[in-house]
Image (cartoon, coloured by chain):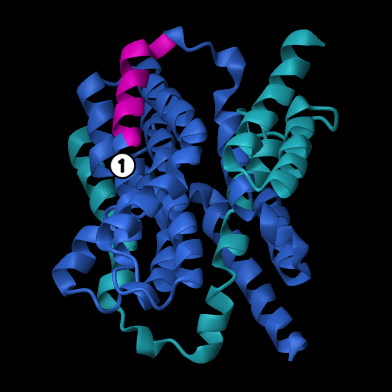
């Protein structure tokens, strides 16, 4: 039963990936829609970033002094100035670990 | 004009730095599956059949918590519905491909691959073999996801939970959007999305993950109208 459920979930996920690429004709989208679609990264990824920082594993808001907020601020600054993905991730993780393990 | 191989390699290089978050998250994902009491084969098979980090964890958590199969499947569908947006963006660059190639390449599209390949596409619209970038980025992420979830299944509880490795996920996406904080219109859209995601976090089926982008895109449309 679990296997069947996984396969259905996989098919649905694949359909989401495939539909707009393979089935929908790009010309159906007007110029205005295309202009709005340029914002997709900015409109989608904060929905992964914000809860990943501000909400804990139990689904409640973190405290204002949570080390994840500090780690995120460091990552934003390092990322902005270094333009380097590895530096962004590592600086965020390290500053988070320094607070939880050393302070 | 770049060759297919050059573009493919650029795709690999573009996502390679994200391995610093994909691999820890894959390990966590595999370990959680085993911790929740599912069989290793089943946990691993999800990495091939679903191939979507967050949705795999939610799926197993729901089933182990006694939720019905319908709820689990609906949640996976809702979480992964953001791929409709990615597809709409990518379709412009993939429209010359044959139908079969479109069907095959779609399987490889995940968040980081979409983000990095889309950046490349925007700067290199004239190239003929653009889709090789997506093959490179998506293929690399696929291979690393398989290996790291497998590692998590095997290592399981050896990975200390205190490390908080899941925190690498928001960091990788910060790296993706951080250069756009120079642009006021993008900042408005990002903050709208982020605040909406917190506001709707408790909405059923994890639907905040698609509700907040939709709200943010409406705001983007408004911003575009005001800019004119």
**Residue at image x 45%, y 24%?**
B28
Residue B2, horizontal then vertical, whole percent: 34, 66
Q: Any idea which chain is the cyan one in this picture?
A: A
**A47 vs B57: above or below:** below
Q: Nearer the viewer, residue B64 or B216?
A: B216
**Residue at image x 20%, y 64%?**
B103
Residue at the limit of the structure toward the left, as seen here: B100
Chain B, hue in figure: blue
Q: For the stretch drawn in magenta, what is the main secondary structure? A: helix
Q: In this orientation, does residue B51 appear?
A: no
The quadrant holding residue B55 is: top left
The numbered mark 1 sits on a residue in which chain?
A: B
**B137 vs B186: above or below:** above
Residue A82, horizontal then vertical, whole percent: 70, 44
Horizontal side, residue B226 vs residue A87: left or right: right
Residue B194, horizontal then vertical, whole percent: 69, 54
Write down the region rendered in magenta: B144-157
**Residue at image x 64%, y 35%?**
A87
| Residue topped by disc 1 | B142
């Amino acid at each position: 039963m679990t296997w069947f459920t996984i396969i259905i979930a996989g098919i649905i996920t694949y359909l989401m990936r495939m539909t707009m690429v393979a089935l929908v004709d790009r010309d159906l989208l007007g110029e205005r829609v295309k202009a709005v679609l340029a914002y997709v990264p900015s409109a989608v990824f904060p929905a992964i970033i914000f809860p990943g920082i501000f909400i804990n594993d139990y689904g409640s808001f973190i405290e204002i002094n949570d080390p994840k907020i500090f780690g995120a601020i460091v990552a934003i600054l390092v990322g902005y100035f270094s333009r380097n993905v590895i530096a962004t991730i590592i600086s965020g993780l390290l500053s988070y670990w320094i607070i939880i393990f050393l302070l | 004009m770049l060759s297919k191989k050059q573009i493919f390699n650029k795709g690999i290089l573009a996502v390679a730095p994200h391995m610093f978050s994909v691999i820890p998250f894959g390990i966590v994902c595999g370990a959680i599956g085993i911790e929740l009491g599912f069989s290793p084969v089943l946990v691993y098979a999800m990495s091939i059949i679903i191939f979507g980090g967050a949705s795999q964890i939610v799926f197993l958590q729901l089933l182990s918590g006694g939720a019905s199969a319908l709820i689990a499947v609906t949640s996976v569908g809702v979480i992964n519905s953001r791929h409709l947006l990615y597809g709409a963006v990518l379709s412009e660059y993939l429209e010359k491909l044959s139908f079969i190639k479109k069907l095959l390449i779609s399987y490889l599209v995940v968040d980081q691959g979409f983000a990095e390949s889309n950046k490349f596409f925007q700067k290199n619209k004239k190239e003929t073999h653009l889709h090789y970038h997506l093959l490179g980025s998506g293929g690399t992420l696929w291979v690393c996801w398989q290996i790291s979830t497998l590692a998590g299944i095997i290592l399981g509880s050896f990975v200390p939970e205190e490390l908080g490795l899941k925190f690498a996920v928001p960091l990788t996406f910060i790296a993706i959007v951080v250069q756009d904080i120079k642009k006021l219109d993008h900042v408005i859209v990002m903050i709208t999305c982020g605040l909406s995601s917190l506001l709707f976090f408790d909405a059923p089926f994890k639907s905040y993950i698609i509700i907040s982008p939709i709200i943010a895109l409406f705001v983007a449309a408004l911003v575009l109208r005001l800019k004119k």
